[in-house]
Image: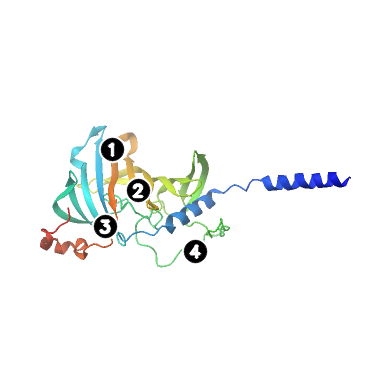
Amino acid sequence: MSAARVLATIGVACACAAQTPAPPLTGEQVLARAKAVFRAHARPPYVAYTLVRREHHDLQPDFENSYTLKIWCRTADRSALARRAWNGKAYGSLQNITVAFDERIDPGPPTADIFERALYGPKPAVEPTALPGESPLPVIGAVSVSTDYDYRVTALTRDGAWWHLALRPKRDPERNRIDDLWVDATTFEIGRMRVRDHLYFLFSGQSIDDEFDARFALRDGLPLLTSIHGQTPFDQYQTDFTFRDVSFPASMPDWYFDPASYGAHKADAPS
């Protein structure tokens, strides 16, 4: 074989090697990177926002369970001062609530850590060990990740600019309730999730299954919940939550989170 032909052959081989596509990511790797990106955002210690709730029952407006709240939240424990609002102004009594998913109260805050263990319950003192047969995942780019202890990815599909992950809880379906995630295929930021929740009936204490379709948007580099559409089986009840006027005060008075002192602060209550 001539020297020219040898060089040409080498050149073709090099070009083919250079054009070999990178191996596709697995569902577990996409989930691991999405978690790493989501958790890399520092959560502000305080968040103030307006929550608009609109309820429908059998496709008819339910005005009794539709309202607007102004909320001042301490994110460390999700303790919050809440007041009813009208035309952008808070009025009426001061309430102390703990904003959370899958509770009788409204979900939130917009800065919620959707991967917090037990979905907004207390974190365990000791991290669980891997299940039998589980092994650490490889390094993805500059992010080192381990086997996910909460979810198994049952499907990974491309949905336009998003990765769509179908999830199944590994251990406790009542704690790990995310069913679907949409992850930006370039940045791995989360844009949407579907999560199992419940619609609670305050007087009876009973509840029925409710599926939340939640949307996120980046603001100042922080992924925030912007809206949630809740729907019960057979479309009997539909609830829409919208998070508006989100701000991150550097501090809030301690009495905001001490309901015993509310009576002494009626005159200087936030509006």
Q: Is residue 153 visible?
A: yes
Q: Distance between the Cα atoms at labels 3 and 4?
A: 33 Å
- Is mark 1 in CB contact (under 8 Å) with mark 2? no
37 horizontally vs 227: left or right: right
Please tell me whether residue 102 is drawn above or below residue 267 in the rendered image: above
Residue picked out by circle 4: 129
Residue picked out by circle 3: 73
Q: Residues within 10 Å of mark 4 (few under 14, many from 20)?
A: few
* Secondary structure state at the residue bearing disc 3: strand
Amino acid on which the number 3 mark rests in the picture? Cys
The spot of residue 143 in percent (x, y) is 53, 58
Amino acid on which the number 1 mark rests in the picture? Tyr
Nearer mark to the viewer, of 1 and 3:
3
Counting residues from the start of the chain, the first of labels 1 and 3 encountered is 3
- Is mark 2 in CB contact (under 8 Å) with mark 4? no
Please tell me whether residue 118 is drawn above or below residue 193 in the rendered image: below
Q: Distance between the Cα atoms at labels 3 and 2?
A: 15 Å
Please tell me whether residue 144 is drawn above or below residue 31 in the rendered image: below
The spot of residue 77 in percent (x, y) is 30, 61
